Amino acid sequence: MGAIKKTLATVAATGMMLTGGVVAAGPAAAAAPAIETEEVTAQAYPWLDRSHMTSTTSQQTPRNLPYGSASVQVRTGIHSDGSRYGWARALNANTNHILRFEIDTDGDRVWDLAATKNIDGNTQWTNGYATSSSSNRAFRACVMRSISGCGTASQVVAVTDWW
């Protein structure tokens, strides 16, 4: 219940919440857990709905972390609009876990935005977020036992380095 109140307080204070498993938190110190919902609207730019990730071109995997027989990755690809997006992908992960994609927007390497996806099959991926030439923007991916940040050691199964 405390996490819900904290999330609602953050949303009320910042006025920033998107659908599609995406919550934009306020300052890093007040980071709220992401909430999974059903869809992202086209107006959610720079977020892109997960259904578009597999149709991107020039896909790359700048971060790949094998653990056991599974792997967590940061992936990138070019959308049909010409923009490059990043997203998290899990391969062969436990179906009781959660995939999380964290975005740092201000260069402090603490998440500012995040997308989550319940793992319910062999290959899962999150919504995507537009890349940037700015060194302030960075991505990382993790697989967790329950919703928390990728920096919560007790809940994280595997976490990539920032990219």
Image (cartoon, grey):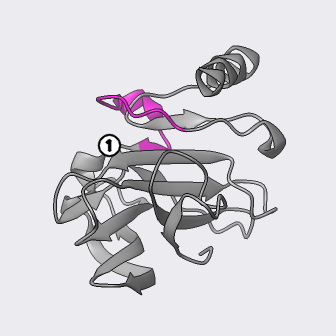
In the rendered image, the vertical position of residue 37 relative to residue 113, given as above or below: above
Q: How many neighbours does mark 1 have within 10 angstroms: few (below 14), some (14-19), or many (20 or more)?
A: many
Magenta stretch contains residue 16: no
Residue at point 44%, 55% (across, down): 145
Q: Quadrant of the N terminus?
A: top right
Q: Position of residue 2 (x, y in %)?
A: 66, 23
Compare residues 146 and 44 and report the one nearer the observer: 146
Label 1 residue SS: loop
**Is 163 left, or right, of 35 in this rendering?**
right
The residue pinned by badge 1 equals 49
* Residue 33 vertical placement versus 142 (above, below): above
Residue 31 shown left or right of residue 74 in the figure: right
Instruction: Count every numbered label the image shows and give the total.
Output: 1
Q: What residue is shown at x 40% (from left), y 70% (from top)? A: 76
From the viewer's side, name the closer residue of 80 and 56. Answer: 56
Q: Is residue 42 magenta?
A: yes
Residue 89, quarter of picture: bottom left
Q: Main secondary structure of the magenta part?
A: loop
Q: Residue at x 22, y 47 (%)?
A: 51
What residue lies at 29% left-to-right and 29% top-to-bottom?
Answer: 38
Amino acid beneath label 1: Asp
Where's the C terminus, which quadrant?
bottom right
Compared with residue 147, is residue 9 higher up or lower down, i.e. above or below? above
Q: Position of residue 8 (x, y in %)?
A: 63, 17
| Image quarter of residue 16 | top right
- Which span is picked out in magenta? 34-47
Residue 41, x across and y down, in percent:
35, 28
Left or right of 51? Residue 152 is: right
**Residue extending furthest top?**
12
Task: Residue 57: give x, y in percent of width and height.
Answer: 25, 70
